Image (spheres, rainbow, N blue to C red):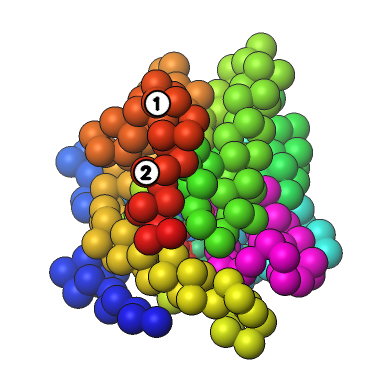
Amino acid sequence: METPKVNEAKQTELKKQPETPEKAAPEKNKKTVIIIGASSGIGYESALKLIGRNYHVVNISRTPCPLERVKNYAADITVGSTLEKALHAVAEKTQYFYALVYCAGFSMAAPIEYVNQKDYRYLFEVNFFGALRAIQSAVPFMKKKGGRIVLVSSMGGLLPVAFDSFYSSSKAALDMLAKSAAIELEPYNIRLTSVQPGGTSTSFTFKRKVYGDEDNGEYASRLNKATAALANIEQGGMSAGEVARTIADVLDMKKPPAQVQCGGKNKFYAVAQRLLPGNMSLYLNKKKYRQ
Ligand SMILES: NC(=O)c1ccc[n+]([C@@H]2O[C@H](COP(=O)([O-])OP(=O)(O)OC[C@H]3O[C@@H](n4cnc5c(N)ncnc54)[C@H](OP(=O)(O)O)[C@@H]3O)[C@@H](O)[C@H]2O)c1
């Protein structure tokens, strides 16, 4: 499989320092945002943006966010209740937090016929159940004053990703979770939004668990084509900074939308996918993944 290189211009973003706010708020007046998954990529860039907009940022992930001004709590979403413990530790310290951004994600390339149950359950734990558990833990601390919850979903929740049906399904479930929780939590002024990036140039592409030819049997060649096409879409796609801007804008809005795509092209795809007959949309998607 031909694997694209991480776009170097975009990689330099990782070396950026937070913008200094025009007028820095005193520490005690800053609103706290917890990002789950700010050690790299979109979550890291969101931390950078939010610090620049005068928020106090806390990260929860396995490895720390390298930004000096971010407070880190270590947790692996897939291990016991370490996620809940980390969220409670933050809440004990801050008493109240304004927003939760669930950014953790994982993806795979495997055929449905041969995929291992352990793998797709892991994927769902990171992409969906972790978000559900985070909301459950955070809501008691947000209820009194209200706040924002952003779930970082994907265009893959609207349009199928060939040979990553697990990822697409988990993101579609996440979108529905955002919409239905928005109804439940509106009386507490807790607003939920699922942010749907399209391909974004981060190291996500290279962390994908791709099954080898020996596991994929007769699907091997089609799976390799689809995975190479997806890697190109991602590495040729948006920068994590652009996605982070959408996330930060959502947190600043009085009444954020339930769902938002990042950038004009993805907004267009979202509308087209609703308007096109189902078979036409599937046909175009098949071509995108060289099927
Ligand atoms: N890149 C794209 O093309 C793209 C497109 C659409 C949507 N998205 C979505 O955007 C989100 C961020 O992706 P990204 O591109 O920024 O990828 P990334 O750089 O790989 O970031 C993933 C983040 O999730 C955290 N994470 C993963 N597994 C975890 C676990 N078991 N426990 C705790 N934290 C965990 C990682 O932290 P640690 O490894 O330090 O734990 C990291 O901070 C994901 O939800 C992804 O599905 C990405």
Query: Badges 2 and 1: C-beta atoms under 8 Å apart?
Result: yes
Secondary structure under the numbered disc 2 in the rendered image: helix
Task: Judge whether 65 appears above or below 97 on screen.
Answer: below
Most extreme residue toward the right is 80
Query: Left or right: 69 with respect to 129?
Result: left
Q: Residue at x 36, y 52 (%)?
A: 287
Q: Is residue 187 visible?
A: yes
Q: Residues within 10 Å of mark 2 (few under 14, many from 20)?
A: few
Image quarter in which the C terminus is found: bottom left
Q: Amino acid at mark 2?
A: Leu
Q: Residue 112 in magenta?
A: yes
Q: Residues within 10 Å of mark 1 (few under 14, many from 20)?
A: few
Image quarter in which the N terminus is found: bottom left
First-in-chain label (2 vs 1): 1
- Image quadrant assignment for residue 256: top left
Q: Residue at x 57, y 49 (%)?
A: 168
- Say the numbered circle drawn on residue 284: 2
Q: Is residue 55 visible?
A: no
Residue 162 location in percent, x, y? 51, 57
Q: Residue at x 21, y 51 (%)?
A: 20
Judging by the rendered image, the residue that carries numbered circle 1 is 276
Q: Residue 261 in magenta?
A: no
